[in-house]
Image (cartoon, grey):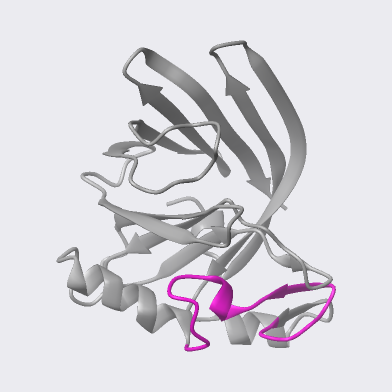
């Protein structure tokens, strides 16, 4: 893992790109930022920062009920339980969350990603947590075959996200961790081939 990937917390600055290929090609790109947090150490991180809080209002904040099963319980045991129930690992090591914080109390996270490591420090699974505009949430938990610089995964779509995209789709995920930079690409395929390309790219500051 890179140095950034072992920090308790980091701020990634970068950009997001969306491109739809059919029926008419359309694309846009904008600047963005994400928090990278060890979910077992969020309280300790928040206690050191003036403008960031956990479970209370601030300029930037995270509420643990905004993730997973929407309870106020600590997030780390909930994600660890998901890993255990899925048979991925019984006792995980560090679990890092890449997500958007609330800003002045408001946030919409279309995607949050948990990087789940084993006790040896190797990346063992990625949990892709998807939210839609209806306030619903769904997770895709996919084991990592090899803790490599480039990780490729895929799964069938089984959660409604947009009224403009159907359900008979397949996701292909590609995560690249190189020179402290983190890039995530999500390609969406239907029966006719590649339909939608989404990518985020950031570097820790």
Name which residue lies at 37% across and 79% down: 78
Name which residue lies at 56% across and 68% down: 37
Quick one: which residue is furthest to the front in this view? 163
Where residue 23 appears, x then y in whole percent? Answer: 55, 11
Name which residue lies at 73% across and 84% down: 48
The answer to if 101 sits in the magenta stretch is no
The answer to if 62 sits in the magenta stretch is yes
Q: Is residue 56 above or below residue 162?
A: below
The image quarter in which residue 21 lies: top right
Q: Which residues are magenta?
A: 54-73
Where residue 146 appears, x then y in whole percent? Answer: 24, 44
121 horizontally vs 110: left or right = left
Q: Main secondary structure of the magenta part?
A: loop
64 horizontally vs 77: left or right = right
48 horizontally vs 172: left or right = right
Where residue 70 appears, x then y in whole percent? Answer: 50, 77
127 horizontally vs 146: left or right = right
Where residue 129 appears, x then y in whole percent? Answer: 45, 57
The image quarter in which residue 7 lies: bottom right
Quick one: which residue is furthest to the left in this view? 87
Front one among 200 and 48: 200
Q: Is residue 129 above or below residue 75?
A: above
Q: Number of marks in the image?
A: 0
Q: Is residue 117 above or below residue 193?
A: below
Q: Is residue 204 above or below residue 9?
A: above
């Amino acid at each position: 893992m890179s140095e950034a990937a072992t920090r308790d917390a980091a701020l990634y600055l970068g950009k997001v790109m969306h491109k739809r290929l059919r029926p008419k090609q359309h694309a846009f790109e904008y600047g963005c930022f994400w928090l990278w947090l060890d979910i077992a150490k969020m309280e300790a991180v928040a206690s050191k920062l003036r403008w960031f809080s956990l479970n209370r209002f601030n300029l930037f904040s995270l509420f643990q009920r905004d993730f997973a099963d929407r309870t106020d319980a600590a997030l780390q045991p909930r994600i660890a339980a998901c890993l255990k129930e899925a048979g991925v690992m019984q006792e995980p090591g560090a679990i890092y969350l890449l997500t958007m914080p609330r800003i002045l109390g408001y946030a919409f996270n279309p995607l949050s990603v948990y990087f789940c490591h084993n006790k040896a420090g190797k990346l063992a699974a990625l949990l892709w947590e998807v939210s839609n505009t209806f306030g619903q949430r769904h997770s895709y938990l996919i084991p990592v075959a090899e803790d490599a610089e480039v990780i490729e995964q895929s799964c069938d779509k089984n959660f409604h996200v947009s009224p403009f995209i159907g359900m008979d789709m397949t996701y292909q995920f590609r995560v690249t961790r190189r020179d402290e930079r983190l890039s995530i690409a999500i390609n969406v395929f239907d029966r006719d081939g590649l339909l939608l390309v989404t990518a985020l790219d950031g570097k820790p500051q």
